[in-house]
Image (cartoon, rainbow, N blue to C red):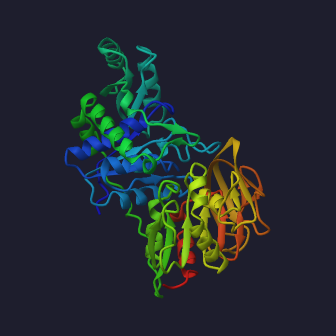
Amino acid sequence: MSGSVPRLVVAAPSSGSGKTTVATGLMAAFAARGLAVSPHKVGPDYIDPGYHALATGRTGRNLDAYLCGPELIGPLFLNGARGCDIAVVEGVMGLYDGAAGEGELASTAQVARLLGAPVVLVVDASSQSRSVAALVHGFASWDPRVRVGGVILNKVASDRHEELLREALESAGVPVLGALRRVARVDTPSRHLGLVPVAERRADAVDAVAAMAEQVRSGCDLAALEALARSAGSLACEPWEPPPAVGGARRRVAVASGPAFTFSYAEHGELLTAAGAEVVPFDPLRDEQLPEGTGGLVVGGGFPEVYAPELSANERLRKEVAALAGSGAPVAAECAGLLYLCRALDGQPMCGVLDADARMGERLTLGYRDAVAVGDSSLAAAGTRMRAHEFHRTVIEPGAGAAPAWGVVAPARRVEGFVQQGVHASYLHTHWAAEPGVARRFVERCRTS
């Protein structure tokens, strides 16, 4: 694997500037030119990578320097970019915005610097003209270690507006690589946790990605953008590899998927497979049984609150999940999975594995967390430290069981989640690449097929 894959980071001065439209459209436009495109997203976001996957035909992957550590950014990038001609990395928030109180950590700028990748700055130009030059100059000069290689002007009102913007930017020393008009068809619907995932609106999402691609093709200089990507040098690291299993019979791990459970990191499946598992997806909205021979269950994040009546109606599967958990088999549940294991969600019966109830709340809980395993579980030995991300608008009562899953040590101390028999259920999303032993420990505890 060569560490010199051409690459670009698509960033912006702030959220809402159009990063997702430009990054996804650029991925699709490059793919339409016959390039194998590797899609990436800075930060913990699960939803944008689904649109990236539609645009490229490849799995969208996350690059999170908080969850995984800066040292894994290059290796994880190279793992995802295997066999690709070019990579596009969509940033998060504003270019220099990182984890609260942690300086540059987990910012788009840090990831761009770690990848040695040029940055394309997407600027919402809808309410400015000459001031755009001061804005771009400030972002380009703030950190000399970050190379802003070009600007794409978004939400341009007219030809005259574009002309004024380009004239102003001539003095900024950063080339304009595109100018995009507002196009309603590119807009994608949102709700309480962000964009609606691809799995819930696939046909409309395909149309939206096609519209993004057309907008980028017609408004951007693709040749110049590709040339900028090719100016990135080699990375002085090797691709990440999941550690191999150490013998033993193969185990079957069922992984919840479908519209209600869309949040997952690609590396989790790779780690489970490398640890000796046969990973079998199933859809709790449609499948009435767990896959035959299931020895362990992973239920990640998603939107069960949107599908609570349908999940509740699938009583046969709920009983199978409860029986599997009751047998002592390992069950790893994060956020949406935690809700699914409760007695009820917004009054709708769920699996009843946990002595807790869930409901929609009024407040969004969002942020990075530092956590330590309170006791031994199917995922982690007591004392294991992991970094995590919390993102939900639901409430669990009680918030922790007699044996909590995690002790959150930052930003505020508390205990959280549930450990009982083989069940490990928590609101916290973790990235197992940062602690590969989690997957190995889980698989070792699975029943053999």
The x and y percentages for residue 319 are 62, 71
The x and y percentages for residue 67 are 56, 56
The residue lying toward the viewer, choosing from 296 and 124, is: 296
The residue lying toward the viewer, choosing from 234 and 321, is: 321
Q: Is residue 118 visible?
A: no
Q: Is residue 260 above or below residue 167?
A: below
> Who's the residue at 46% across and 16% down the image?
127
> Who's the residue at 25% across and 43% down the image?
30
> Who's the residue at 57% across and 77% down the image?
441
The x and y percentages for residue 366 are 64, 45
Q: Is residue 359 left or right of residue 88?
A: right
Q: Is residue 403 left or right of residue 16?
A: right
Quadrant the N terminus occupies: bottom left
> Who's the residue at 51% across and 55% down the image?
263
Q: Is residue 90 above or below residue 418?
A: above
The x and y percentages for residue 443 are 53, 78
Q: Is residue 80 visible?
A: yes
Q: Residue furthest left?
A: 34
The residue lying toward the viewer, choosing from 281 and 310, is: 310
Q: Residue furthest bottom?
A: 248
Quadrant of the rendered image containing residue 91: top left
